[in-house]
Image (tube, helix red, strand yellow):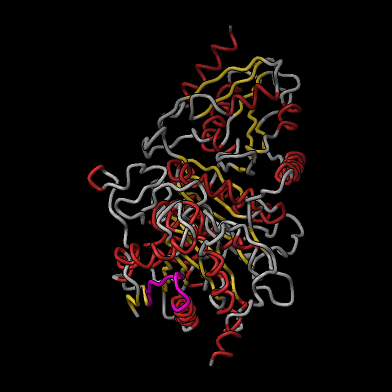
Amino acid sequence: MAIKESKKFAKAKSLNEVDTHYCSGCGHGIVHHLITQVIDELNMAENTIAIAPVGCAVIAYDYWAFDSSEAAHGRTLAVATGIKRCQPDKLVFSYQGDGDLASIGLAETIHAANRGENISCIFINNACYGMTGGQMAPTTLVGQKTATTPKGRDPGAGQGWPLQISEMLAKLNGVKYVVRSSVATPAKVKETYNYIKKAFTVQLNREGFSLVEILSSCPTVWRLDPVQSNEWINTEMVKQFPLGVIKE
Amino acid sequence: MVSENILMTGNEAMAQAAITAGCHFYAGYPITPQNELIAYMAKHMPDQERVFIQAESELAAINMVFGAAASGKRAMTSSSSPGISLKQEGISYLAAAELPAVIINVMRGGPGLGNIATSQSDYFQATRGGGHGDYFTPCFAPWSVQEAYELVKLIFDLSDYYRTPSLILADAIIGQMMEPLNLKTKYPISRKLPQKTWALTGARKRKPKVIRSLILKEGALCEHNEHLRKKWEEIKAKEQRFATYKSKAIEYLVIAYGSQARLIQEAVDILRKDGIKIGLFRPISLWPYPVKGLKKTSKDVKKIFVVEQSLGQMVDDVRLALPKNEVHFLGKAGGGIPDVGQIIKFIKKKIKT
């Protein structure tokens, strides 16, 4: 079993051998590994088209060895819809952060989900805008300090509450699979692998929209070291964003 | 299937033209006065196993078109003025990523929500890129239902050939009016089209491809802009289109496009009965502006009149093309149309002074 597991988590063939631009301790690299390993296991690299967001993962396509498209900020699932409707046999997934998916692209997200687009969405929730220097995201926790909430997010000051996208989308008929996970512990990393595989399988079975929300650390913006960052996910973020399968 | 000669609105004719041209993907959002177009696509695209999506917004529609174009399929969206403003972000990305797509604007009165009457007030937006960054979009303006049908077919070819988003700039009159339409006109019209080797179709037996407009490497975006500049220059040199009416041996020239040119045609006939040697120059390509044809047609004229359903937008291109000529402008915006009587009165007055 141990040998099998270690083989599973070796570098994927569909992950390019290049250094990424991600910060130390950032969760994006782990999720890139997981996605590419799943695609290898499903033997889908030649039939995958990914759509990268605007945000920290904007050049994710430099790291993936399959066809990829850019999308304007938030329009990721609209571009994905255009691709998937023209090529229904391809595995099409969007890779989006919380700003892209839950703020500027919220309309595209809800409507792609509500149409039941047969697309998988990998949603990285790190409770902040990383690329632009750590501003408040829709998912920023109450009290969390960011560049635009210097006193901590305060719903009483008109800054709103953390948006629970997965719970919202799970209510839609077109949505067939929703799960929230994290990459903050080795066990959760393994679980996340299985969730991504399940989401892609839902798509390959033409069942409808699937979403994997992944709580992912941003040590740079959070001003924590990588270990502390994972602890913050495990103790604080999960209170607002409970882990587990939400709909299947 | 529709029969050969039929009565159709311009909106329906443009929709049918897209289907005839092999448009595989259409996404749109309701807005007056182009609703017949989206309804026609909703009715006829699925029958032919093509994709119709009523998008949640203009933003979504143009970005769905981006995805379809990235897949190598012919794709189109349509809207009217306020909706076209919303699409500008996507049009800029299409131009940057060199993805072919067709965007139809059935113009209405502006600015803002304006009204639903006819207008030609989006000329600046259509001919100066419209969105952010240095780019242009080929832009054709039909003056009849038949020409709307022909130009939509033609612009699909042109978009594929140059790998660029392109616009049809119609106005509410063209979109709404019904005219006899011959659907059996010759097609394809234009040119041998390149293979879409850049399309995202899955990296089978080839290296993975990326469609992108983010170009961060030092100097690389300058190079990309230079590459685009050469494309715009080539289009400017090769794709100028125009028509003339009674433009031989003239002393005066009127310039107008779209539905306004139809009124000018009538005004020209009336003025000529009064002995005034006047003709019509009608730009069909608004970008590239038909400068060569305009210079030739206006060579010996004394005065030039530009008439638009706007406060004066195309007139700038006339003045740029003909800096030494005497140019007079007549226009109305917000749904106003300079009518034949007003045009005749205006021209006669300006000839005397």
When asked about the image quadrant of residue B262, the answer is: top right
In magenta segment, residue B266? no
Q: Residue furthest top?
A: B353
Task: Please give the count of numbered marks on the rendered protein.
Answer: 0
The answer to whether residue A183 is magenta is yes
Q: Residue A98: where, in percent of width, then height?
A: 42, 58
Q: Quadrant of the C terminus of chain B?
A: top right
Q: Position of residue A177 (x, y in %)?
A: 38, 77
Region of the chain picked out in magenta, as a range: A177-187
* Front residue of this view, candidates B292 and A109: A109
Compared across the picture, whether B325 is left or right of A96 comes to right
A34 above or below B262? below
A236 in relation to A202, above or below? above
Q: Is residue A171 visible?
A: yes
| Residue sitting at the far bottom | A1
Query: With A46 as the anchor, is B28 left or right in this view?
Result: left
Q: In the rendered image of this protein, does residue A146 appear above or below residue B71?
A: above
At horizontal 45% and vertical 81% (from top left) the residue drawn is: A198
List x then y, in percent, for residue A105: 42, 55
Q: Foreground residue, A248 or B137?
A: A248
Kindly identify the residue that appears in the image at 50 percent across and 46 percent down.
A132
Residue A199 appears in the rendering: no
Residue shown at 28%/70% (left/top)?
Answer: A171
Q: Can you give x and y, in whole percent of width and height, for residue B349 in the image?
A: 54, 11
- Report which quarter residue B286 is drawn in: top right
